[in-house]
Image (spheres, rainbow, N blue to C red):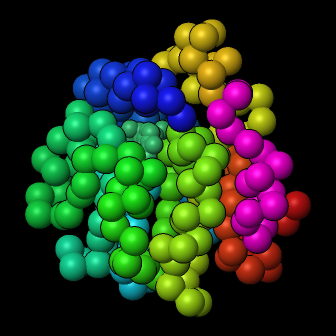
């Protein structure tokens, strides 16, 4: 996305970081988290790259060692919350796109982007997720599903920009399988028999 759009997204998340965990603490969202990790946690193995890691949801629900975790997020506010809860876990304060340009060699057994984070990536970087994946590794990317945006943080202008940014045809052609999970379009290579029935 353009630099000004990325600045706008960072500003939104730096502000939202202050109340993010409280906002998602309700029973309804916790049920959604539990349903997600019932599908995903068995596939979180080896070195884990958490794209748009936010305040550390992945670490809340999974037992990952410090040596095996790397979280990437452009919002310093979100990362500050993660570090307060999970001191010593490695994070990089960057967009996925910029980090990916600077680190071409690392490979990960697990690459995830949860609850909308990949919806902020420039479409040109979708395929780079696959370049960071180890052979036999698994990825699980939760884009916002067509027509859905988290209304509480978006203005109408932001929604229009997001609609122009997310390329659903490219998602379908780049990634192995897609399925809908609540408000998200998940792109993954977890075998279909381990995913909810369509
Ligand atoms: C809806 S939050 C999800 C956070 C976390 N994955 C979770 O499930 O709680 C989206 C996150 O994506 C991050 N983000 C925005 N643009 C990004 C980009 N280009 N690369 C990586 N992360 C990005 C935001 O800063 C924010 O923390």
Depicted 22 relative to depicted 155: above or below:
below
Residue 58: in sight, yes or no?
A: no
Name the residue at 48% across, 24% down: 5
**Residue at 50% in and 85% down:** 134
172 drawn magenta: yes
Q: Residue at x 74, y 80 (%)?
A: 191
* Farthest right residue in view: 198
Taking the view exactly as shown, the residue that stands out farthest to the bottom is 136
Please tell me which residue lies in front, 20 or 131. Answer: 131
Q: Can residue 24 be seen by looking at this rendering?
A: yes
- Farthest top residue in view: 156
What segment carries the magenta color? Answer: 163-180
- Relative horizontal placement of residue 45, taking residue 178 as reference (left or right): left
Measuring from the top left, give residue 143's x and y in whole percent.
64, 46
Q: Please give the name of the residue rendered at 51% of the width and 55% of the height, measured from the top-left corner.
A: 113
Residue 84: % across, % down: 13, 47
| Quadrant hosting residue 105 | bottom left
Q: Is residue 29 above or below residue 91?
A: above
Identify which residue, 100 or 138, lies in the foreground: 100
Q: Position of residue 109 (x, y in %)?
A: 47, 82
Does the magenta segment cover residue 48? no
The C terminus lies in quadrant = bottom right
Ligand 1 positioned in quadrant: top left
Image quarter hosting the N terminus: top right
Give x and y (percent) for residue 156.
Answer: 63, 9
Say above or below: 161 vs 67.
Answer: above
Q: Is residue 42 left or right of residue 196?
A: left
In this rendered view, identify the residue nearer to me: 122 or 158: 122
């Amino acid at each position: 996305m353009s630099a000004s759009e990325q600045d706008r997204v960072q500003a939104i998340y730096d502000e939202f970081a202050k109340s993010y965990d409280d906002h998602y603490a309700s029973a309804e969202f916790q049920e959604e988290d539990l349903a997600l990790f019932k599908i995903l946690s068995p596939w979180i193995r080896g070195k884990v790259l958490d794209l748009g890691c936010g305040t550390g949801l992945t670490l809340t629900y999974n037992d990952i060692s410090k040596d095996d975790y790397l979280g990437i997020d452009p919002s310093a506010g979100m990362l500050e919350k993660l570090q307060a809860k999970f001191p010593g876990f490695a994070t990089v304060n960057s967009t996925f796109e910029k980090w990916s340009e600077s680190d071409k060699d690392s490979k990960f057994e697990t690459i995830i982007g949860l609850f909308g984070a990949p919806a902020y990536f420039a479409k040109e970087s979708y395929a780079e997720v696959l370049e960071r994946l180890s052979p036999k590794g698994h990825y699980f990317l939760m884009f916002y599903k067509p027509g859905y945006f988290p209304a509480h943080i978006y203005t109408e202008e932001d929604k229009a920009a997001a609609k122009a940014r997310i390329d659903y045809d490219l998602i379908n052609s780049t990634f192995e399988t897609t399925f809908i999970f609540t408000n998200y379009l998940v792109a993954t290579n977890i075998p279909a028999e381990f995913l909810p029935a369509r």
